[in-house]
Image (tube, rainbow, N blue to C red):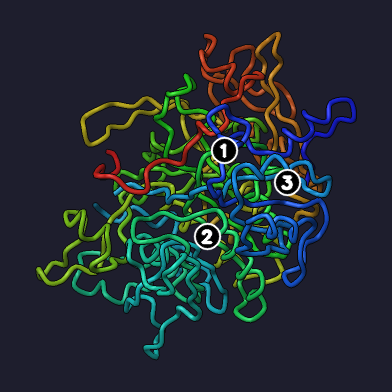
Amino acid sequence: MAAAPQSNLDPERAVRGRMAAEFRSSRFDQGSSKMVKVIIQYKQPVSNSQEAPGERDMKNQGAMLHTRFSSIRAVVMSVPAWMIPQIAKNPNVAYITPDRQVQMTSNPDEDPMAATTRDVAATQFSVDGNGVGVAVIDSGVADHPDLHNASGASRVVYSESFVTGDSTTGDKYGHGTHVAGIIGGNGASSGVYAMSHAGMAAGVNIINLRVLDQNGAGTDSQTIAAIQRAIALKSTYNIRVINLSLGRGIWESYTLDPLCQAVESAWKAGIVVVVAAGNSGRDNSMGTDGYATVGAPGNDPYVLTVGATLTHGTGTRVDDAIASYSSKGPTLGDHIVKPDLVAPGNRIGSLRAAGSTLDVTYPQYRELPTNGGTAQYFRLSGTSMSTPVVTGAIALMLQKNSTLTPDQVKARLMKTAWKGFGTYSSSMDVWGHSHNNQYDLFSYGAGYLDVSAVLNNADLASGAALSPTASRNLLTGVVTLTNTSLLNVNSVVWGSSVVWGNSVVWGNAALSSNSVVWGNSVVWGNTLLSGNSVVWGNSVVWGNSVTGALSSDEDGEN
């Protein structure tokens, strides 16, 4: 983890650099005795059982310890606001952030997952994710027949709640059950439906780690605690994948963000972390036309970040389009190229959590059986839904070859992603508003999830598959890729035609090796973008990037 900037010539600046932007704001009362819940990251390891540097002094002055996180060298404490600048003066402290809220990335008719994603696994490769453990860090998972095995036993093999004051592990919001169904539902309740509602990998085991309450809200510390538990349980339940269909705004570099540090710790422990890009692709509040709206921890270059497409209800890719709400890169501040790839996420039918907040609020999204009986399924839209599609595909990959590392999984998915999109498309929301979408690597990354191609591929990358960084020449406006990854085996190299495609038009120019990505034009066309100073300049507005509403009354788009 990179430490905050230090300066012997300007100690005050060094102290400010150890505090998150919220604490440096003029609106934050540093003289107040009001208690603030914070995450304090240290430069050296922190034991789960021993006090961190300065912890005793903070307790003696009114601070209260909540949790120690050895995985990210941090503690979670409630401290008086006046104490925060004092904590930042401790030379052992790397960075202090608030315990921020995280949210889910979904929006509330057909079967959009289609043959191009799910059915190929069972028919061609005889894999269903059997034996692979997937940690679903979400709003909980309700008991549902589609999550049982052939003997009737639940495949939710472990459940724990990290929601403060609520130890129940069921799904009071209705989001986590839906996500779990996309990953591993077996379609057992589909007999009275016109089509199957099976998930991607019907044999996986689900590890249910609840971090979001009945309103779909949670915090960084709850999410980090769940990630740390997944790491601890990795061997017990063969946890190979973590699904995070949640996120929040970006407030600092991923090198300092505690949530990003947590997902990196899981990745380095051998667990693939799949994260939703967010639903802010229509957000122009920064003047960026929806670019630079990917949320955290999807901004971390280690993880696999997923955007959403709409399939128009057909079983072929050629008419599929980017969902206009799908968040776009590059990431604020660090300019990491995100998302890494896209998958179906619009109007996805999956498991209904009866009586949950979403179920009660949006009964019109229940999918009724042909006999008019009780609905077993519910439809939602968003990158929350496309993320478990990819998670399920990874479970299939790992059943087929259990020795794959997270970096090999990511590299293979990106290399084999379908790259046949056109240059532009348009879509229509439920209010009748048309949205024009440009296809470039900030919209759909390396391409469209292709399950058949990835299961047929045998390439084994070596090194770290970090997402590349986009660099813009401030004089010419030219954008190029910086190969931050160490991936270098055979022809699988970031920036090469193998990964990104040598004949695919990304925006207005063909991407080829390390050459200019978009010719002499700015990423967004031939005219200068009003939001350039936000994305590329020094005036980055931390925190304006959001992952979108948890859910809404918008039923996806057409």
Instruction: Say if 40 sits above or below 516 in the image.
Output: below
Q: Is residue 330 visible?
A: yes
The C terminus, quarter of image: top left
- Residue under the image location 53 percent in, 72 percent down: 129
**Dot 1 amino acid type:** Ile
**Dot 2 amino acid type:** Asn
- Mark 2 or 1, nearer chain start: 2
The numbered disc on residue 243 is 2
Per the image, the residue denoted by label 3 is 87
**Dot 3 amino acid type:** Ile
In the displayed structure image, the side of residue 102 where residue 554 appears, left or right = left
Q: Residue 301 appears at what percent x and percent y?
A: 67, 44
In the displayed structure image, the side of residue 126 where residue 502 appears, left or right = right
Q: Is residue 406 visible?
A: no
Disc 2 versus disc 1: distance between alpha carbons? 19 Å
Per the image, the residue denoted by label 1 is 250
SS for tag 2? strand
- Residue under the image location 26 percent in, 75 percent down: 189
Instruction: Compare residues 309 and 83 and report the one nearer the observer.
Output: 83
